[in-house]
Amino acid sequence: MERRHFLSSLMATGLLASTARPTGLLRLLEDQKSNEEICLATFQMAVDRMLETKPIGVVVAEIGKSFVGTEYVAHTLEQAGEEHLVINLRGFDCVSFYENSLALARCVKMKTTTFEAFKKQIQWIRYRSGVIDGYPSRLHYTSDYFYDNVQKKVVRDITKELGGVPFTKKVGFMSAHPEAYPKLKDNPAFVQMIRTQEEAINARDTAYIPKEQVAGILDKIQDGDIIGTTTSMEGLDTSHTGIALTQDGQVHFMHAPLAGGAVEISSGNLSEYLMRITKMTGIMIVRPLEPV
């Protein structure tokens, strides 16, 4: 029995609450799944539900929902050795959660539901111009990630049209703190490349929506919109990312929480979530585009 069908049958019989995470033997069975098996099971779920007929934002949101309860794992992409494509569908940080949901959704919409097609989409989305060329080629800052994927026509930046104002905060944390990044601390050439990228980011016309204004634009946010939460932390543009999801008529924030745990849907709406966290100052928001 396919993974999600198995879980559904347990929920229907009351053996597993719909919001519970797998435990015991079920957790062990989940952990033994390979990334390819999880990928293909997700594609099968999408086919069974005819998600390819839905707008891509809906597909992103539905795939994201299928990962609710998946373990939070920090620094999922930080692997030893030369920069290479890392695939991990068994645990997510906040970026890899929305990134994998988006890549899987693009495959569903393109009807290329193979593991190899998924890996190609991950590389296209994750790396500058879709090319792996060392650690600096990976898109590290959220605003840069959004910008590059706007150029690649993966997403459209809707921050300004939703009332965004100029984002004048400068990035520079990575070059200022190379000791915090294993692949930077002993590589001055990489640090200089990152610094050059930071200068390019800081020269762009970037916008954000202050969190005090988010309540007024919730009705304009759609399922599957990808959100970066801007931060007051020095040298960073955002501190967290996630996916918009409508439940009970309210737009919620679906994300892999920074403090550990598992992928979850915010208890309050997006505005309420932002207002609870002092260092979050607002949002940047992009909308997935239908792949061509």
Image: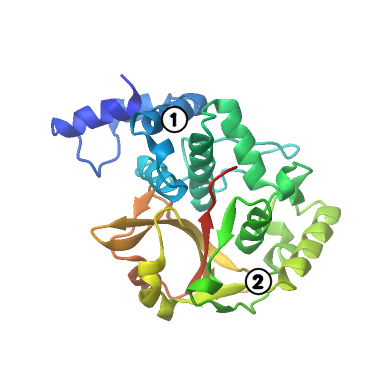
Q: Residue at x 60, y 60 (%)?
A: 142
On screen, 184 above or below 201?
above
On screen, 52 above or below 37?
below
Name, please, the residue furthest toward the left: 13
- Left/right placement of residue 200 relative to residue 76 reads right
Q: Residue at x 34, y 22 (%)?
A: 2
**Residue tagged by mark 1?**
43
Task: Quote the CA–CA distance across marks 2 and 1.
Answer: 38 Å
Residue 102 horizontal/vertical position (percent): 51, 45
Residue 261 horizontal/vertical position (percent): 38, 49
Q: Residue at x 43, y 37 (%)?
A: 52
**Residue tagged by mark 2?**
235
Q: Amino acid at mark 2?
A: Gly
On screen, 102 above or below 149?
above
Please tell me in which quadrant of the rendered image residue 85 appears: top right
Q: Secondary structure at mark 2?
A: loop
Please tell me in which quadrant of the rendered image residue 131 appears: top right
Residue 61 horizontal/vertical position (percent): 40, 48
Please state, as top left, top right, bottom left or bottom right, where the N terminus lies in the image: top left
Please indicate, yes or no, whether residue 233 appears anywhere in the rendered image: no
- Left/right placement of residue 54 relative to residue 86 reads left
- Left/right placement of residue 289 relative to residue 173 reads left
In front here: 266 or 286?
286
In front here: 207 or 258?
207
In front here: 116 or 231?
116
Please state, as top left, top right, bottom left or bottom right, where the C terminus lies in the image: top right
Q: Earlier along the polypeptide chain: callout 2 or callout 1? A: 1
* Marks 2 and 1 close (CB-CB < 8 Å): no
Residue 28 horizontal/vertical position (percent): 36, 26
Please indicate, yes or no, whether residue 47 appears anywhere in the rendered image: yes
Q: Amino acid at mark 1?
A: Phe
